Amino acid sequence: MNLNQEINHMVTRFHAVQRSVLLLYLSRYYNMSTEMAANALHKAEVAHYCYVKDDFVCESDGTVVDSTIRQMSRAIRVALEFMGLEEYTFFDRRVLNATDCTALLYVLLPPDEEALQKNAAATTKLLQISYIQRGSEIATSRMLASMPVPKEVRKVIQRIAIVETGYREEYIAKAGYMMFIRFGRDSYTFNSNDVFRTDKESRWNDVPEKV
């Protein structure tokens, strides 16, 4: 697909993507500067491959940017941390939309070189990206924690929770989250100070093992 088609493909799949997140994706996909990606996006808008509304790139002029779209844009931003430069098949082959309310996106993580050196049969892992709104820490995390996960499966699943400024970690159940990534109000990016890793030995404590 050419650049216009790729932009259209992304906004059609997700209905709308926050502008800075889409620009980051394009810059990695085509190995171009953010400025060049912005110019390309403007041309795509003029040609009606997409529509820009309130700093979101939408599939149509009638798209309503709601909380679900805002949360998904943050999930896409997290997923982009695992995309290789010029990895054209990333969203088609390695990123899946979640089918229930416990997650937003799944990302397939191939074994790294170190894992392959130790074990030629090293398995692909599944990254599960979910969202915890401030004030819903107990309800959201306990919903996920209530679903049993066998011990062997826990070696394959890696869970990341997107959280908001002011979130209460002490209210979040130990549902297998390996890290929390904090986004500020109206922010769609993060830095190293916004990443909080959990204790490996206790992160699954509230999740039953047997199905």
Image: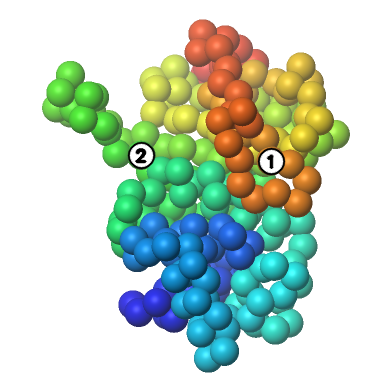
Q: Is residue 58 above or below residue 102?
A: below
Q: Position of residue 13 (x, y in %)?
A: 53, 68
Residue at 35 percent of width and 79 percent of height = 2
Amino acid type at mark 2: Leu
Tell me the CA gap for discs 2 and 1: 23 Å
Q: Is residue 161 left or right of residue 30?
A: right
Q: Residue 115, how many percent across, how many down?
A: 24, 24
- Where residue 191 sits, quadrant-wise, is top right
The residue that disc 2 covers is 109
Please identify the quarter of the rendering in which residue 45 is found. bottom right
**Quadrant containing the N terminus in the rendered view:** bottom left
- Image coords of residue 159 (percent x, y): 53, 31
Residue type at mark 1: give it: Phe
Asked if residue 90 lies left or right of residue 38, the reply is left
Element carrying mark 2: strand
Foreground residue among 135 and 210: 135
| Mark 2 vs mark 1: in front | 1
Q: Identify the residue at image location x=39%, y=28%.
A: 156
The first of marks 2 and 1 along the sequence is 2
Instruction: Say if residue 35 shows up in the picture.
Output: yes
In the structure shown, which secondary structural element does the residue marked by tag 1 occupy? strand
Question: Could you tell me which residue is drawn at 64 percent across and 18 percent down?
Answer: 174
The percent position of residue 89, horizontal first and vertical second, equals 32, 60
Residue at the image position 41 percent from the left and 43 percent from the top: 82
List the residue tagged with mark 1.
183
